[in-house]
Amino acid sequence: MCTAATYKTKDFYFGRTLDYEFSYGDEITITPRNFPFKFRHTNECNSHFAMIGMAHIADGYPLYYDAMNEKGLCMAGLNFVRNAVYFEPKNGKENIAQFEFIPYILSHCDSVLQARKKLENLNITNTQFSDKLPCAQLHWIISDKDESLTVESTIDGLKVYDNPVGVLTNNPPFDIQMFMLNNYMSLSPKQPENNFGKSAELTTYSRGMGAIGLPGDLSSASRFAKVAFTKLNSVSGDSESESVSQFFHILGSVDQQRGCCEVAEGKYEITLYTSCCNADKGIYYYTTYNNHQICAVDMHKTDLDMAELTAYTPITEGKVLFQN
Amino acid sequence: MCTAATYKTKDFYFGRTLDYEFSYGDEITITPRNFPFKFRHTNECNSHFAMIGMAHIADGYPLYYDAMNEKGLCMAGLNFVRNAVYFEPKNGKENIAQFEFIPYILSHCDSVLQARKKLENLNITNTQFSDKLPCAQLHWIISDKDESLTVESTIDGLKVYDNPVGVLTNNPPFDIQMFMLNNYMSLSPKQPENNFGKSAELTTYSRGMGAIGLPGDLSSASRFAKVAFTKLNSVSGDSESESVSQFFHILGSVDQQRGCCEVAEGKYEITLYTSCCNADKGIYYYTTYNNHQICAVDMHKTDLDMAELTAYTPITEGKVLFQN
Amino acid sequence: MCTAATYKTKDFYFGRTLDYEFSYGDEITITPRNFPFKFRHTNECNSHFAMIGMAHIADGYPLYYDAMNEKGLCMAGLNFVRNAVYFEPKNGKENIAQFEFIPYILSHCDSVLQARKKLENLNITNTQFSDKLPCAQLHWIISDKDESLTVESTIDGLKVYDNPVGVLTNNPPFDIQMFMLNNYMSLSPKQPENNFGKSAELTTYSRGMGAIGLPGDLSSASRFAKVAFTKLNSVSGDSESESVSQFFHILGSVDQQRGCCEVAEGKYEITLYTSCCNADKGIYYYTTYNNHQICAVDMHKTDLDMAELTAYTPITEGKVLFQN
Amino acid sequence: MCTAATYKTKDFYFGRTLDYEFSYGDEITITPRNFPFKFRHTNECNSHFAMIGMAHIADGYPLYYDAMNEKGLCMAGLNFVRNAVYFEPKNGKENIAQFEFIPYILSHCDSVLQARKKLENLNITNTQFSDKLPCAQLHWIISDKDESLTVESTIDGLKVYDNPVGVLTNNPPFDIQMFMLNNYMSLSPKQPENNFGKSAELTTYSRGMGAIGLPGDLSSASRFAKVAFTKLNSVSGDSESESVSQFFHILGSVDQQRGCCEVAEGKYEITLYTSCCNADKGIYYYTTYNNHQICAVDMHKTDLDMAELTAYTPITEGKVLFQN
């Protein structure tokens, strides 16, 4: 399905994989400050923070999958099938359509702290973007350099969780994902000691045995554990190139290879794209399944005071660098 | 440590990761047909198949880690610490120093079939390349488009195993690796059915649950299972770009991220480089830890009738492709 | 900690292990129909269903750990540490002290259906039995031959879950336990087929490989999966001796051996006793850690119209049956 | 299939489970010192150590599954299907038919040390007991209070392994079983610490979480790990009753419940019997699937200077001890 993660060195990085069996046609989309957001149930917003991210643009509207704003606040929506429940608009609530949620938060908030306040009175509505575009069943991660939240709208209403590990995948609900992580608490990047029984004379026959028990399949709970372990133990230099490279290694740990997750006879879910936002510099990096080279769009190379979207088609075919 | 794999679409692909905490200084090295191989214990060979691969060049000699020859025969040496045993030269045997093994096989053999014959009377000797370069403790995979072998020189002598899965990692010996794979035989890219108990009303809450139980840690046995599953279930188009891309996804499944395998206080094993040989076209593709773009050297763009090595320094820093 | 399970052949069986590092002093206790139950917050009950079970008798009051009544309704309390929350008495609610919960339900209800109705307006209070006996942090399983419930009083109030597998252990809350069972859905008593990859030529080297992945440690989540698998797949004759024997095999699958669960330096949790109620015949069977022979007390051999408790001290030392 | 284990407190204990889908008809059999053993390929032995164990008696000959002799040497044969290979009698070797192996060793040897010497020149032959009784495919554990051996006759000849853990199950060969135990070396009866990542704030939600990863299915490799962990960490008093009780808890950890290991449609392998020899006192304890009470035969209550076998039929139905 999908995986999101955060990473911090000198700058703050945020990104996600989008795993699916086909693409809806996505573009790296910059929404400048004066693009008019006409929210369905609340006030229009014609002046706001600029943002960049991956979006499907429908009728001129950026349906963001993941994005960051110019203040370094980042947000991504990930599949949450059969658990996501949205509601009718409610009186006295700030009613935000499911598809407006990322634009709304990134327009108004410069930090997780501000987002947290907005969420106090928020109701995510089941308003469809159009007849042809039903609501995606999602939950969200909202992050800045200091902290992360997970937001889930379920049958019990809107839930806002602190996300201490800074990762998100899909089902089950976030509190259960975090609970299940307890089962892996003894895993370590260091070699294990023999606790099994002194007389057994056991040995480490390979490096990397301290994390035996870490799952490697592509289910959402296993990806959560694998990427959390990889992210929490990641070590890299703090230069831009080293940080970005490490970030793609982190999300690469839960890459979905074509053939390994069959969703219907002969149809396979794959990692369509992987993104990495430098939240300090406003650069949106990405790779695609067949383009291993890191590509990028820098929001600050665009005039952010415009009113029109700027969109870049992802480069989905990689170019091999021949040395001879 | 390291992982090797094969993959076949229209062409045949072979490659490996080299995982370690530092690099010895490696170069993509083309050995042309007339480079004189002065073997220590057997006849000099001044006319042979040309080959390309990653090598540490010492005193003008290509110490190959992995390579293919112009006939499409591929070979890689992977760490086999505490199990590799080499012997003194023996009368009546074809005595080949450990460091000569890849050049010797790739010089003489156009197929696994021919390599198999050479191995019948071969003795891998403990002859050091030099005082400063002791024998690396290795085992090998030899592959062509039709089949793969694993070669291990142990306390019991030289062992040649058919390698039906076309993958190799490190310890334990290959027969035990293959045996342990039986424990994963029920894993599948398809969703599981409920066999646990009819009354339990269990459900699949995520895609990809059919492979729950597949390991995700970086130990050699876990990498063997993970990469075997990924390779055996891989699906891709058969064009060059799709095949090469899929190959890097296969080996990416066992990528070693910096921080996740601590080998000494503050020292981490990482995937220094990943290679992919197109054995039909003689192109050596690779990526490095910080260069995600696929780079390549084509052996046929070199005069293969020369007598001197041609070496290309790997491009270890990736260039970001900015779209604006 | 503890495990409870149900089993049905011709008759219905219910029982539990009590796992702890010491015993409070327990007795198989028959409460006859006219024993006066003076509930703390609701009407006294002087005529009720008779019951039998394991109890610590304090000041003449049977503090039941597990019991069944003469109608075949069974109930057990199991540790639920850090999740159990009890409340002050509430107006308009049937307020039942935590320690009264088993006597209250078994006094009044002849079936899970009736218990379910009682639970609709019930509040489990934090009223202590005495200054010296603080409230045990528990959750409960209530079962008859047709169905089972799990009851949990948590920070969110009283929760009543259908329990389709008829087993209970300890943390986490029951809905999470059931969710995690999904991870084991492919496990089977039958041998696995090779789905891993056709070319891998994998084989079953042992019987019983279809359940590889079933956990065998003593944590509460692992015991839940292990006992659920064992119970759901159990097969036995339906005679009393075969059924009871099979029941002790089911709970034996999660037996806690001394030494394998260290709770403090040199202190070990063990399975102090295992019980098995024949809910149709009113016979309470049990074994203890050092008494492997099945012992029993038959409630119908007691005058159930009395007003006084009858208690039997468990036989904790087994007698070896010497054949010569 | 089967599991064997040793345990030492003040005395030395040895025993096994016999797991199968039906019984051949077994008896606890005492072979006194003067019972004439007419070996097929070597000298008759009419005066030897007395022994007791479980045997199928055929034509007056005790086909032992497991036994101990009066000197405290213990031995058991366990299924080793598709790996056991026996040979034709060889010149210059002590040729012992497979079915004679236990009687031969226990007749002649007072210790593992002596057995080790006998094994130096031994050849296990494929001589059948009779036309109707083909050779069972077995490997063996030989133990005294000081050490254990595993003996395997395979295509490569007779192999004698030190057995430092004192347990045996079935396939794969013993060296691979021991190797695979390395994968569990970090498991512990103590609670785990959080090595996963400091920021993750993981907690132990249950006791017994230090051994998460220990397998609980009934395959031979999983039983090997489970019983080794249980045995190596076992703690008990050293009295006879406490030691024997603990021993049955150790082997109970790999009990095979009817229904959990289906070997053919509707046919299930179960633990037919579990034995426990007190090797110091010559007492053979056992339980059966439907007799949970520990029964016993004391070899020293028999005249060990006789020439005739004494056999006791196992009590396969348990008697419930009613307290009222």
Image: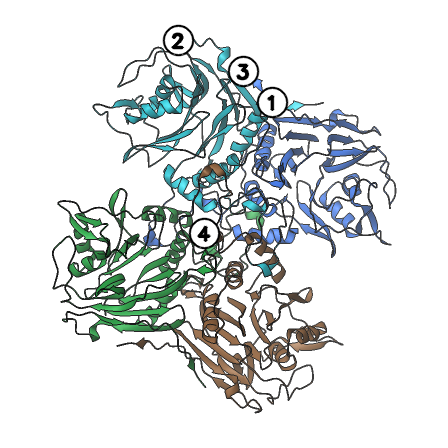
Chain colours: A brown, B green, C blue, D cyan
Q: Nearer the viewer, mark 1 or mark 3?
A: 3
Q: Dot 4 corresponds to which residue?
A: A209
Is label 1 on the same chain as label 3? no
Q: Quadrant of residue B60?
A: bottom left
State which mark lies toward you, 3 or 4.
Answer: 4
User: Residue B140 or C1: which is nearer the viewer?
Assistant: B140
- Residue C323: assigned label: 3
Q: Which residue is mark 1?
A: D319
Is the C-beta separation of discs 1 and 3 under 8 Å?
no
Amino acid at the residue labelled 2: Ala
Q: Mark 2 Cα within 10 Å, few/some/many (few <14, many 20+)?
A: some
Q: CA distance from mark 3 to mark 4?
A: 51 Å
Subunit of label 1? D
Residue D276 visible in the shown view:
no
Residue topped by disc 2: D307
Q: From the image, state whether disc 4 or disc 1 is nearer to you.
A: 4
Q: Is D46 situated above or below A210?
A: above
Disc 1 to disc 2, C-alpha distance: 34 Å
The kind of residue tagged 4 is: Met
Q: Nearer the viewer, mark 4 or mark 2?
A: 4
Residue C249: % across, % down: 56, 34
Chain designation of label 4: A
